[in-house]
Image (cartoon, helix red, strand yellow):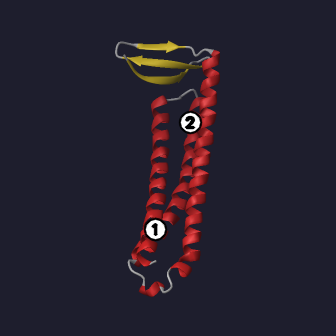
């Protein structure tokens, strides 16, 4: 039974795919077509991640700008508006999305550098890399959650006061 897949660096500086089993560890060379497919998948993931982060920033900044710019047109007297806290928290969440996304970029770059450094030093550890990827994914999910929550709160505010 396969428990997980593992990539390890051999002393000859070639990458191998390693299947961990309950009984023992097996090292299997990747065929060239599978290596090419893996490289395509890596490139696709990179493009998707980059696109996700750009879209997150555009949507958050756009919603923040639009809501600040048009709130005076939608809500005639902001001082008498109901549940102003919804608007305030919504703006804070949208601003937080932009900041979290910025920090996500910085953290991801640092973690990628660490992994490259480990590979060059022949100290690559698959589990460390998975933990790093997991931490960046958690930050990205948190950022997406703040975006959706901010938009939702602003929509509720506008609905209550329109």
Q: Quadrant of residue 20?
A: top left
Question: Along the horizontal axis of the image, is 10 left or right of 90?
Answer: right
Per the image, label 1 sits on a secondary structure element best described as: helix
Horizontal side of 156 relative to 42 (left or right) equals left
**Residue labelled with disc 1:** 155
Which residue: 54% across, 42% down?
111
* Crowdedness near tag 1: few (<14), some (14–19) or many (≥20) residues, C-alpha within 10 Å: some
Q: From the top left corner, tell me how far across and down residue 1 is, in percent.
A: 36, 16
Q: Earlier in the sequence, mark 1 or mark 2?
A: 2
Classify 10 Å Cα crowding around label 2: few (below 14), some (14-19), many (20 and above): some
- As rendered, which of 96 and 155 lies closer to the eye? 155
Return the x and y of residue 112 as percentages of the image width and height. 58, 40
Residue lying at 34% horizontally and 16% vertically, measured from the top left: 22
* Horizontal and vertical percent position of residue 95: 52, 65
Tag on residue 41?
Answer: none
Is 44 displayed left or right of 24 in the figure?
right
State the residue at coordinates (42%, 86%).
80
What residue appears at the point 45 percent right and 31 percent down from the top-left corner?
127
User: Looking at this view, is 77 or 135 the one in front?
Assistant: 77
Q: Give SS at disc 2.
A: helix
Quarter of image, res 69 = bottom right
Residue 108's place in the image compared with 70, above or below, is above
| Residue at image mark 2 | 115
Q: Is residue 144 above or below residue 114?
A: below
Front disc: 1 or 2: 1
């Amino acid at each position: 039974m396969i428990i997980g897949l593992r990539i390890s660096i051999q002393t000859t500086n070639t990458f191998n795919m390693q299947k961990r089993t309950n009984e023992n560890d097996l090292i299997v060379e990747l065929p060239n077509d599978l290596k090419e497919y893996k490289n395509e998948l890596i490139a696709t993931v990179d493009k998707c991640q980059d696109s996700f982060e750009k879209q997150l920033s555009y949507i958050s900044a756009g919603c923040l700008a639009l809501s600040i710019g048009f709130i005076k047109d939608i809500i005639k007297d902001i001082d008498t508006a109901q549940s102003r806290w919804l608007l305030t928290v919504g703006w804070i969440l949208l601003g937080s999305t932009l900041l979290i996304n910025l920090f996500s970029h910085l953290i991801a770059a640092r973690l990628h550098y660490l992994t490259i450094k480990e590979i060059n030093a022949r100290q690559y550890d698959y589990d460390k890399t998975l933990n790093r990827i997991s931490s960046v994914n958690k930050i990205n999910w948190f950022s997406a959650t703040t975006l959706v929550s901010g938009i939702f709160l602003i929509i509720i505010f506008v609905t209550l006061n329109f």
